[in-house]
Amino acid sequence: MAEFSVWFKPFTSQPARLVDIIDALECVGIDLQALHLGDMPTGAGIIFLDHEAPLPEILESLDAFSLYADTRIIAVAVGPLPTSTTWALLRSGVVEVFSWFEVEKPVQIILSRLRYWEVVEEKVAYLQRRMVGNSRCWLNTLRQVVDMALSNCQVLIMGESGTGKELVAQEIHQLDPRPDKRDCVVVDCTNLIPGLSGSELFGHEKGAFTNAISTRDGALALAHEGTLFLDELGELPLPLQAELLRALQEGTYKRVGSNTWRKARFRLVSATNRDLLAEVHKGTFRQDLYYRISGWTCQLPPLRERKEDIVVLAEHFFRQQHHIQQPVDRQVYDFLLLRDYPGNVRELQQLINRIANKHLGEGPITIGDIPRSDWPDFAQLGSTVPGSELEAGVKRLIYQGLGLKEIKDQVTEIAKKVAIHHENGNLKMAAHRLGCSERILQMHMRGEPEMTVQE
């Protein structure tokens, strides 16, 4: 029985070499299935190409594959590739690119990738139960979280307020493979009191300052053999930045009021909603500390970049936190999708709390359950899109010399693409949203010209 089932798509005119490669992969338990026109790729895949392959066609295919959130692709060249092609493939979402006949043990390269992905996907499935979302953007973020957790690097988590930085830090600690790791100790740098902040991090001796009535361990001691999470690290005062840097470099520190050096071994995970590099240039954050803490950086996406997760998150909050099992009217979800969320997932969660608390009875959740204070500004909504963005876009098309039919065709194609992406590749839901047949969207996915269809 094959260890892995992998789809493949060839973009090469060298069939003999391709057959040799496929035979070598199947000999080690990789079942390769050709991807045909109209097929939806799922899971791991390989594209085969050579230097004569039509790069625009390959990139167009990769763009279509990007609709499917669980797709992970290796590009295997049957000959040498230009560096520019390699970078273009990576920018389009390919995870690995190499030339089969120019590396040692190419089979092992692919096997090791597939085995690692299997481990990662198992842990991503666990994370999805804790940090809900199905969008490609979010799944890629969760995969990066798993990668960071399985490494031994210092981690810097960046992102706007409400994107889940502390939750990510806790999950990195949970997934950390150290067999005897101890606790995760959290320090909120925004709550450090000037004059006492050194005590919070390093502890103090009895009598070190007023009210120091006993010896106390600080966060570094408590995090020994575990994880130290410094939330909003950008708020740490400069003098403490120097002391923290010394502790990270040498693995030693002194309690306030003590001359004794103590050891502390821990994994450091930091988080900030600031641009620390900008803070470095302003002189408010030490450059040497920045490079010390940012062994691996992760940028959590704001909710506006993963809007297809809004409905999934809302359902999770309704069901899991408020135990509401009644159906939710589609108009409620349309309202949620229409809003901006400067506070990101935290703001959405608070909005769901208000709707759930207003909901009464056993009927479905409807727009009547939305508090009046959360109603949209209908006057603004009515003028923004048709009056500015859409009108400006149509003007550009007219100035380019397009006629009415060409403009209509372009807008129609964009609407199809947006709806499919919004519904995460679910053609049935996208067709329902557009009010068209699913067949029209199937033809769009296959690149076939649309014929007149009686709806």
Image (cartoon, grey):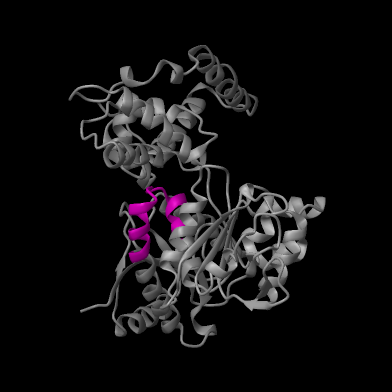
Which residue appears at 53% of the width and 67% of the height? Answer: 222
Is residue 455 in view? no
Q: Is residue 401 left or right of residue 142?
A: right
Q: Residue furthest bottom?
A: 104
> Magenta stretch: dominant SS?
helix
Which residue appears at 41% of the width and 65% of the height? Answer: 174
Is residue 222 in view? yes
Q: Residue furthest top?
A: 379
Which residue appears at 41% of the width and 40% of the height? Answer: 308
Considering only vertical position in the picture, is 115 above or below 453? below
Considering only vertical position in the picture, is 242 above or below 194? below
Give the magenta part as a residue range: 122-143
Residue 96's spot in the image, x, y percent?
A: 50, 70
Between residues 204 and 275, which one lies in front from this camera angle? Answer: 204
Q: Quadrant of residue 428?
A: top left
Q: Is residue 345 left or right of residue 195?
A: left
Considering only vertical position in the picture, is 186 above or below 305? below
Residue 101's spot in the image, x, y percent?
A: 50, 84
Considering only vertical position in the picture, is 102 above or below 391? below
Q: Is residue 385 left or right of residue 10?
A: right
Q: Is residue 247 left or right of residue 430?
A: right
Quarter of the figure that contains the C terminus: top left
Between residues 423 and 17, which one lies in front from this camera angle? Answer: 423
Quarter of the figure that contains the N terminus: bottom left
Q: Is residue 78 magenta?
A: no
Residue 169's spot in the image, x, y percent?
A: 49, 58
